[in-house]
Image (cartoon, rainbow, N blue to C red):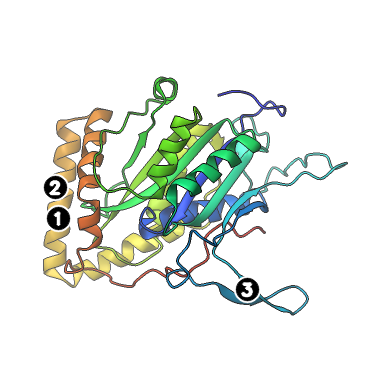
Amino acid sequence: MSETASSQPRVLIVAFQGWSDAGDATTEVLQHLGGLIDAEVLHVIGSEGYVDFQVHRPKLVFDADGNRVLEWPDTRLYGTVQRPGEAVATPRPDEETLRRIDGSPVTELLLLAGVEPARDWQNFADEIVELVDVWSVDTVVILGAMFSDAPHSRPIAVSVSTESPELRAETGAVRSSYEGPVGIATVVDLALAQAGISAISLWAQVPHYVHSAPSPKATLALLDKLEELLDVVIPRGELLVQANEWEANINRIAAADEDMSRYIRGLEESRDEAMAAEATGDALALEFEKFLEGGSRGVEQTEEPGPTDPSDDDAEPGPEPR
């Protein structure tokens, strides 16, 4: 990773609401990080021409002056704004903020949040490539989450892949061998690779029989992998409590449904046997490729027992700056 003028590599983390955001896991990551760095909007890729407004409708809101304004489902770039004459604030020891291992604040992190476009994916990806160039981004991290035959009671598996041989050597990531339907995250990933921009993808497995969103345990798994990948310390806030409550709630529902309990036990046994038989990272990568191949099927499995609260597809994605 190259060094920026601030001596820190500039990293862009990308997530899109929709097909690649099972359990709202990826957009919740950006919400969490955005709060930790007091993110502000730096740039907007307009939704006109990309988004189907009958799927992701604009919202009517009141601005600070009490006027009614439309809020469009745009793709927004967020980051920490350092205004002229302002010194970089040193966080208090007890302040929940993003830090490096040595305790210094993270100042070169950007977040890109939006909904998956309905059309013109190539042009949309080209806009992101241009944005990465304009903002002198060193590395792009693309987040994804898909429904999988994974038990909720085991650690959420996260696959790490990249087209870059250098990043594979540096991070231990693999080159994905998946073939099949993809979302905008993959289109952006390949566009970045073709432009010679370092990009790495993190994909979390979300239990397909848990349809309620968000899935805080999957969000935590992605944050754990980001923390390891970027050598930073990410406060978890209430996410640990929320993840425990999420798992406990599913356990209570399963305890009252023998069919669901039997199904989950089968998933647990399969996961435990796979992890015991093959303790290498290759085994997890192969398992992830297998679940990706059935990802679309997993989303459509509405007959499986379990919570069925739908997620709100109209929710506006992106960090909520504090």
Q: Can residue 83 be spotted in the picture?
A: yes
Q: Secondary structure at mark 3?
A: strand
Q: Whole-Å distance between the Cαs marked 1 and 3?
A: 48 Å
Q: Is residue 200 left or right of residue 150?
A: right
- The residue shown at (68%, 38%) is 107
Q: Quadrant of the N terminus?
A: top right
- For mark 1, does the 10 Å Cα neighbourhood hold few (<14), some (14 to 19), or many (20 or more) residues? some
Q: Which residue is mark 2?
A: 269
Q: Amino acid at mark 2?
A: Glu
- The residue shown at (38%, 29%) is 163
- The residue shown at (78%, 39%) is 88
Q: Which mark is residue 265?
A: 1
Q: Whole-Å distance between the Cαs marked 2 and 3?
A: 50 Å
- For mark 2, does the 10 Å Cα neighbourhood hold few (<14), some (14 to 19), or many (20 or more) residues? few
Image location (x, y in percent) of residue 255: 20, 68
Q: Amino acid at mark 1?
A: Arg
Residue closest to the eye, 238 or 38:
38
Relative to 284, say whether 32 is above or below: below
Q: Amino acid at mark 3?
A: Leu
Q: Are marks 1 and 3 in contact (CB under 8 Å)?
A: no
Q: Which residue is mark 3?
A: 70
Q: Quadrant of the C terminus?
A: bottom right
Mark 2 vs 3, N-terminal side = 3
Image location (x, y in percent) of residue 9: 61, 29
Residue closest to the eye, 157 or 16:
16
Q: Which mark is residue 289?
A: none
